[in-house]
Every structure is written in C-alpha cells, then in structure tokens.
Amino acid sequence: MLRILDITVYFIYILGVLLSIYYIVSNFRDKRLLIDFFSYDLLFLLAAIGIYYVRITPSYYISWDDFTHWGTAAKEIYLYKGLHTVSDLTSLYPIHFNYTRIPALFCYFITKSIGYTEGNNMFAMGLLCMLFSSTVLVRRSMLQSALLFFSVLAAAILYTPILRSLYMDGVVGIIFGCVISIYLQEKHKTRALLCILPILFILPNIKEIGFWLAYFAITAIIIDLFIRHKLKGYVIFYILLLLIAPYVSHKLWVIYLHKFNIISSHSTFNIILFFNTFIDLPNLAYGKSILIMFMKTLPEFAVKEGTIVIYSLFAMAIYVYRKYQLPQNELVRINSIMLVLFSLYLSLRLFIWLHYAGVYLASNNKVQSSSYLRYYGSFFIAFAFIAATYIKKGFLNSAYKKTTLTDNITLIFTLIFFSIISYNLYKRPPITFDKDRKLALDAASPLLEFKKNNHKVMIIFNNVSQFHCPQIIYEIAPYGTFEELDICRNKTGNFWPGSYKLEENFTIDFNKFNDKTSNNKDPEKYDVLYITSLDDNSERIIAKALGLKEVKDKAFIKINGKFTPYKT
C-alpha cells in the first residue's frame, strides 16, 4: 500500500522529468539556450557526482552518529515509509528524538530510485552537499569550477565528516554558506531574497542548529542592505518573509514532537536564560573548567587544516582583486559582519556547553571539548563560500584576463583541494565490514529474529565495546530499545576502548523468565536469554550460572524450570 511519502516522491520524480522535457522542447530551436544549459559547470558537476557515486555507494557506516541517530532515522523512515506515528516502534534515543528528519527523508527520496543501502544513504547526503556547493561553479570554465567547488568541500571535509558519513554539521554549514553566496552573487537583491527563502525554510529542519544559522544569515543580509541603503520598498517585505520562514519551519516540527510529548530544546530557549547563564558563571558547577576549555579551542581552531584552507582562499581572492584593481570594500564589509556574527555564534555554543555541562564530562570528571571542530565549522564553512564567491566574481569580471601565473595558481590550488577530498574519502568509509561491525552483525542477527517473533529478550552483553552498543541497536532497529542500549553502555563504559567481558560472579535470576511449558505468560518476564558473544571463559561462566555442564549456544529458554538451548 502506498503511503503519502511514496506518492510525494513519485510526484516529484514525474514533475522533474516533465519540466526537463518541457525546457528542452521549448528551447529546441534556440541552440544558445541548450548550449548554456549543458555548460561547463553542469558537465563538471555531473562528472563529480558520478565519480563520488562510484566511490561511496559500496561503502558501509563507520561513524558514531551514523549508528546512534542519523542511520537509524533513515532506516526507520525506509521501513515505515514515512515519519513515525505514536504507535510505531523506534530505536531512536529519547534524547535524540527531537532531531529533525529532513535528512532522513531526503535519503528516502534518493534511495527510492537507486535502492536502499548504507552506501546509497551516504551518497544522498553527499549529493546534498555537492548540489548546494554548486553555487560557486563558473559556467564558462571547468578548471575554475573545479577550483571553487573543491575548495568549499575541502574546507568542510576537514571540519566535519561530510561525504563519508551521515553527520549533519557539515551539511547544515554548506547550506548556510550557500545562502550567503547566493545573496552576494545576485545583483538584484529582491531576486536573491526570493531564491534563498525556501532554503531558509528548510535549514532549521536539516539540523537544530540550522534554526540559529538561518537567523544569522538573515541578520548578515539585513546589516549589509542597511549599510548599502537598500533596506526599503519591496526589500523590507521580502525580509519579513525571511524572518518568518525559519520560525514556521521550526514550529511545524515542534507540533509533530508534541504528539510524542517531547519539547524541542529551541522552544525552551530564551534570552533571559542566556544572559543569566553568563552572569551566574562563577557559581556554575564546572563553569570555570568549561570556560578554560572553550578558550583553548579558539586558538586551536584558528590553525586547523580547514581554517588554513579558508585563509588560502582569501589570499587568492585578494590577489585576484588587487591584480585587476577591483573594489574590495564589499569583501571587507561582509567579512566584518560575519566575524561579529561568528562571535555571537561562539557565545551560543558556550552557553550550550555551560547549560548542559554534564553531557561534556568525561568519566574522570574532566571537561571535554566535545566535537568543537565540527560545531564551529558549521558556521565557519560560510567563510569558504564567501572567499570562493569573490574569486568567482574576479574570474567573471570583464577586466579579468587569463595569464600563465593565474592559471598555474588555479591548477595548483585545484589539485591540492582535490587531493584533500580524495585522501579523506580514501581513508573512510570502508567498503567491507570491519571486525567491530562483523561482531555487531553476528550478535544482532539472531536477536532481530527473536524480536520479530515478539519474544521478550534478556540480552547478556559480553565481549563488546561501547562502540558495539549503538551498532547492535541499529542492526535490530526498530525493535531495539533505549533501555537495552543503556544497559550495554553502563556495562562497557569503564572499559572503553577495550571490551567488557562477563565477570566471575555473574548470576541469572530464573524467576525473571517465562517457562515454555506454562500456559500463563507474564508480559513482564523474559522469554529468551541471549548472549551477544561466546568464548571459552564466558562459556564456563554462563554454564555455571545456568546450571549446565557446558554452553555452546548463545540463546536459551526455560523449560520445566531449567534453561535449555533455544534451538531445541
């Protein structure tokens, strides 16, 4: 039976085909329009997407968040053919359930035509990055297109795991940068505002931080228009639409979450809480430690590889502008505005760390700068787009003329940026299951069958590391529960990066299990005892706990008060 999501996907497919045919037929006599359509930038983009498709589609997940949320969300939308209803089973973590689902829906849209696999899901997210990065392509030159396209992706891939995982930090950063780039490139600002309106509408539902990035983009545009004395007439009306769009988008998601009695963190944010957090900083637990950690991250970020890529882009932009004596006041103005906004963004990040201090504590109670590189990068990627946009403007300027020096510089930088992307894609993701993934699959396969047959299973985690926990729950989604994940994490937490193994004093409470011979099944009791992995030591421990001479099986049921292998 088709659900509304399938109908929507098929409608978009058919509409896209019809519009393409209409464009070609209506412009068939005008060869110039057809030549413009199949231009260097489009041909380059199609080639880049094709090469990326060949590399990524045979791959498998390997990143933490692929298993803990984004991969699970995509898998469950694929299984349910739409968003969850209140009655649907889910393996999504309660603390992650408020994460938005547009990325997973886009995966569904793409994989509906090419097939559902982990590699195809990563291709869908990579495709999203490449499409929004295409705003910096140069129509008349494939080399210039390659330079600018690879430059923004190189910066993003050094900050975040884009193109090789389902992490959303880089995706949301690229879309944010795309918005700024469109605004800067379009001469008619009212047209630019209309172009970015739908993008700003979806940005909050790519990742929650997209809500704030949307308003940072709008703020930058308003300030720039005000300085240029263009904040008047129809522009004000379009600005009002921009201000409303992200809020409406976020509110639609909030309404959906209310069905599950979940409140979005952005719905509880208020400016008073923001300022009070900083005023009370001396009294906050771990406040000083978090502030020190935050201050350490700033100089580290300033010399990270992605930041150096952006420095090199600005150096090239300044070189082009000076060589052809182009005005630099606009370049200075937009960067000044964005640097001020980046400072505000950092204060927001610091507020989140202070407000949720417990999340960023290690087992030894030391504050960790949790993933700061991709968090800061979500905003800073926009500077790569700004630099690339002004290089593009320099290339397209009538005064620009090719020289051996500029061509050589362009070629060298293109090769460097392409090498950065290629190297990172070479390293990961894998095209075969690694040892950890094989162990998780081996543990999850029988467990999934038990769950499908409505058996309540007590899982005994053995010979697993903390990274195996989300992998096992992902494999059995949507049947895995957060409680099972929590048990696994509590068992393995103190052994990271090693593996937890059964302790000698391990025991089993027989009274917690239903007896197969009994007609009265207690829904609160377990039906199956399952051990994730066996070795000589664990076989001995399990046998002793179950009162058996030896154990060679991983699943057991209780019959006449005694445990026996499930297969019998």
Image (spheres, rainbow, N blue to C red):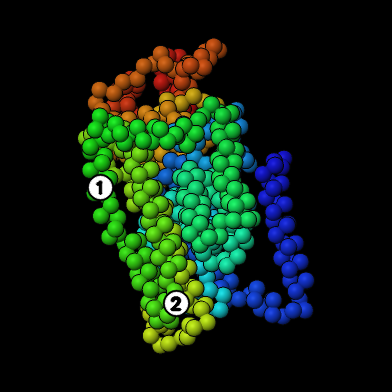
Image quadrant assignment for residue 192: bottom right
Residue closer to the observer: 275 or 401: 275
Label 2 amino acid?
Leu
Q: Residues within 10 Å of mark 2 (few under 14, many from 20)?
A: some
Q: Is residue 370 visible?
A: yes
* Location of the N terminus (image quadrant): top right
- Classify mark 1: helix, strand or loop: helix
* Residue found at x 63% / y 51%: 237
* Residue found at x 69% / y 76%: 34
Q: Which residue is mark 2?
A: 326
- Classify mark 2: helix, strand or loop: loop
Q: Residues within 10 Å of mark 1 (few under 14, many from 20)?
A: few
Q: Is residue 130 visible?
A: no
Q: Position of residue 526 (x, y in %)?
A: 46, 20
Image quadrant assignment for residue 77: top right
Label 1 amino acid?
Met
Q: Which residue is mark 1?
A: 295
Residue closer to the observer: 246 or 361: 246
* Residue 199 vertical position relative to residue 559 in the rendered view, above or below: below
Image quadrant assignment for residue 318: bottom left
* Residue found at x 32% / y 64%: 308
